[in-house]
Image: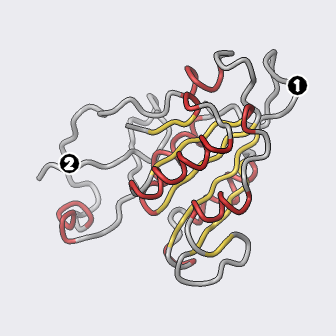
Amino acid sequence: KPSFFAIASAPSTESGEFFFLVKESESNAFLTSIEKGAKVDMSIPMGKGFQVEEYLDKYKMDFPTCEVLLFACGSGLAPIAAAIDSGKLQLKTTGYMSLFERKAILYVGAKTPNHLPLRHRYEEWEQKGVKVVPVLSRVAGENGGTGYVQDLLKEKGVRVPKNTAALLCGMRGMTDNVKELLLDAGVFEGRILFNF
């Protein structure tokens, strides 16, 4: 049965393995209930992915990218995870474009702490230069926020819009709202990236 899933692992030519983050539902039970080692047919990846090199690394906007804001909810974290793990965000590095280390903030939305996807990876991502901010819609968040990721963005704002880029993946309402808030703050539209 054909379905679309985002790859949650960085590209690897060595292992040839892919990791997917799949929210279990009736429509994908055929996949989530198969036994380990079962054969699964896949097509080539579709979509353009996050075009990080084109829009974050080149000096297109006259201002270097020093901060990358990452927005995801639920299984939308899959392509964001792949971007973090790929190293293409070039976090904690400086270069000829900037004297400041590039940092990232990940706003990840979920209903409760138990619904936070890939929680076991957050500490590893923090080591890579990603501040992880959980945003919980059904209970009060301890180290993050309560409500929705766009609510927290509205509250926190964007520190230096001209030096900021964003990667978004998740429900349409969230991504549309976040994009509008980023544009209103002054982030260049070319630096607001989607994975499709």
Where disc 2 sits, the SS reads: loop
Furthest toward the front, the residue is 184
Q: Position of residue 173 (x, y in %)?
A: 42, 58
Q: Is residue 55 above or below residue 119?
A: above
Residue lying at 79% horizontally and 30% vertically, measured from the top left? 93
Judging by the rendered image, the residue that carries numbered circle 2 is 40
Q: Is residue 191 left or right of residue 51?
A: right
Identity, as a three-letter code, of the amino acid under mark 2: Val
Q: Position of residue 94 (x, y in %)?
A: 82, 26
Q: Residues within 10 Å of mark 1 (few under 14, many from 20)?
A: few
Q: Residues within 10 Å of mark 2 (few under 14, many from 20)?
A: few
Q: Nearer the viewer, mark 1 or mark 2?
A: 1
Give the quadrant of the C terminus.
top left
Judging by the rendered image, the residue that carries numbered circle 1 is 99
Q: Position of residue 127 (x, y in %)?
A: 76, 50
Q: Nearer the viewer, residue 138 or 25?
A: 138
Q: Nearer the viewer, residue 83 or 64?
A: 64
Residue lying at 25% horizontally and 48% vertically, measured from the top left? 4
Where disc 1 sits, the SS reads: loop
